[in-house]
Amino acid sequence: MESKKIRVGVIGASPDRGWAARAHVPALMSLPQYSITAVGTSRRESADAAARAFGAAHAFTDARQLAEHPEVDLVVVTVKVPVHVELVEAALAAGKHVYCEWPLARTSDEADALAKSAHSAGVHHVIGLQARYAPAIAYARELVAAGRVGRVTSATVYAARSKGAGGRIPAWAAYTLDRDNGAGTLDVAGGHTLDTLQYVVGGISDLSATLSVQQPEYTIAETDDTVEATSPDHLLLQATLTSGALVSAHVHDAKVTDARTRLEISGTEGDLAIVSTGASGPAGIQVGELRLLGASVSGGTYQELRIPSRYGCASGIDPAAEGFNVAQMYARLALDLSTGSHSVPDFDAGLRLHRLLDTIKLSADMGTRQSLG
């Protein structure tokens, strides 16, 4: 693939709405290493419209046919979580590289099966944990590893999204309210936030968690119908890192005002803070632009840190755009595909995160502190 573009087939590429149109397509179009050659949706009209809108030569309503097409090297899965297994397996069966949005699956068992299938297929497999590629996150990780704050003593996270504010939710998102679909607050906001936390300061060794459904019923915005929520919308977490540092986290949805994310890292010689900013800030740590603040003088105040330009590898897209972090990860994936390296988070990373969320659920259900194996 050194001398030609990576040909991409995007499943879930509705031209009217959705994460593919908002993030993946702009990201891919901004990078010279890629070409969108195929798109797939569930309806012929939308598939054809997507092909016209995104300049793809091929439009499909059958994901297997898209994956098997000879002009597709990489299959991107950007649809609802309950169908991830079927679509990812189709791509792996065709011997294609796969990029699947997070969450990888509804359950850890499903994620484990996909990871095993991906290894058997011998292809590159990628899970969409793109917050790792936000410049502020990558630089914070470097500073922590270099001892910028001394020994990390604690990390404090507050992550609140505006999704469901006022008890109303768009029809397309209603499925996330069902716990069995694996796409609720814990799975999405919790998964992205806790993956970022661990990426910067290290893994969690044990934890105690509380999950709560504070908004048990929502109104569908388009119809005014009501729907029950069984998926928790609040997570409170106390944890210990493998280093011995302490973690406190509150993740929740339906924030009516000032939805935002702030991750503070305290150390023996200073502090760092990663804060959301801009229009995409209410959507979560993985979306939009982040600022990095630092303080190293006793009694001093936070000052914004200049992030080195080496952390911006996707120059063709606005850093404030929803798809910027996605583009950053695609840029790194292109290097992996050309060199045979494996640097981007893969299905194994996705499985580890699923198992962390399982431990959180177990702690909340049992009311006891749990260790991670």
Image (cartoon, rainbow, N blue to C red):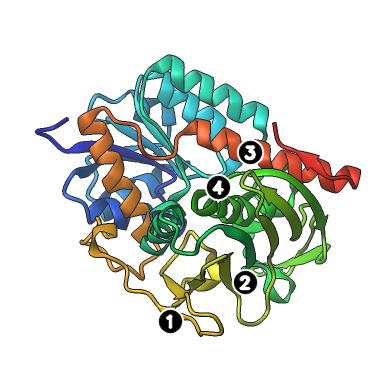
Circle 4 is placed at which residue position?
Answer: 202
Where's residue 225, x and y in %? 76, 65
Compute the Cα span from label 1 to label 3. 35 Å
Where's residue 299, x and y in %? 56, 84
Res 162 label: 2
Of all residues, the one furthest to the top in this rendering is 120
Of callouts 3 and 2, which one flags the residue occurring earlier in the amino acid sequence?
2
Tell me if residue 257 comes above or below residue 330 in the rendering. below
Report helix, strand or loop for mark 1: strand
In the picture, measured across the screen, residue 192 lies left or right of residue 288, that is right
Of callouts 1 and 3, which one flags the residue occurring earlier in the amino acid sequence?
1
| Residue at figure coordinates x 78%, y 44% from the top left | 361
| Residue at figure coordinates x 27%, y 30% from the top left | 73
Res 354 label: 3
Compute the Cα span from label 4 to label 3. 17 Å
Mark 4 and mark 3 residues within 8 Å of each other at the beta carbon: no
The nearer-to-camera label among 4 and 3 is 4
Label 4 Cα crowd, 10 Å radius (few <14 / some 14-19 / many 20+): some
